[in-house]
Image: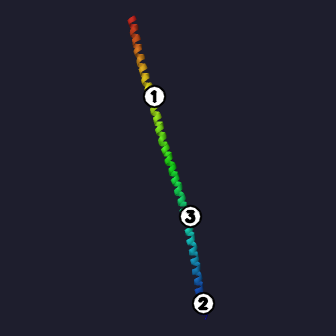
Amino acid sequence: MQNIETSSLIIIWLVVTIVFLVYLLIKKIFEIKKLKIQLEDVETVSEIKISSRTQELEEIADNLDEEVKKRTEELEEKIKDLEKIKKLSIGRELKMIELKMEIRSLKKKKS
């Protein structure tokens, strides 16, 4: 009889242990599911942030391209102005040289 009682107690202990282990397993499964949902939320938020930042950077790049074009046009215009001034200056200097030569020539003729 005592053998049967001991066997019964062992069986009960095993059943209780199995039930407890199943409980722990179910608890872990729910924790994993909760973590999975949190991870998916983080992933979604990260994708939104990355997409937003990418769009911002593309807009910045476009603005920079336009700014470079604008500044390039301004510099090209300044270069044209400087080239005109250079031509005028050279022309003026050549005329001055010509006039100096003419003055020398006239001075030689006068003397």
The residue most toward the bottom is: 1
Give the image location of residue 55, x and y in percent.
50, 50
Asked if marks 1 and 3 touch (Cβ < 8 Å), the reply is no
Front tag of 1 and 2: 1
Relative to residue 38, is residue 75 drawn left or right? left
> Which quadrant: the N terminus?
bottom right
Q: Which amino acid does label 2 sit on?
A: Thr
Asked if marks 3 and 2 touch (Cβ < 8 Å), the reply is no
Determine the residue positioned at 47% across, 34% down. 74
- Using a 10 Å C-alpha cutoff, classify the residue at mark 1 as few (fewer than 14 neighbours), some (14 to 19) or many (20 or more): few
- Using a 10 Å C-alpha cutoff, classify the residue at mark 2 as few (fewer than 14 neighbours), some (14 to 19) or many (20 or more): few
Front tag of 3 and 2: 3
Determine the residue positioned at 49% across, 48% down. 58
Dividing the picture into quadrants, the one containing residue 96 is top left
Which numbered marker is on residue 22? none
Q: Which amino acid does label 1 sit on?
A: Asp
Determine the residue positioned at 48% across, 44% down. 62
Name the residue tied to disc 3.
Answer: 38
- N-terminal of the pair, mark 3 or mark 2, is 2
Give the image location of residue 46, x and y in percent.
53, 57
Give the image location of residue 39, x and y in percent.
54, 63
Relative to residue 4, is residue 87 drawn left or right? left
Determine the residue positioned at 38% across, 6% down. 109
Name the residue tied to disc 2.
Answer: 6
Q: What element carries label 3?
A: helix
Q: Is mark 2 on a helix, strand or loop?
A: helix
Give the image location of residue 23, x and y in percent.
58, 76
- N-terminal of the pair, mark 1 or mark 3, is 3
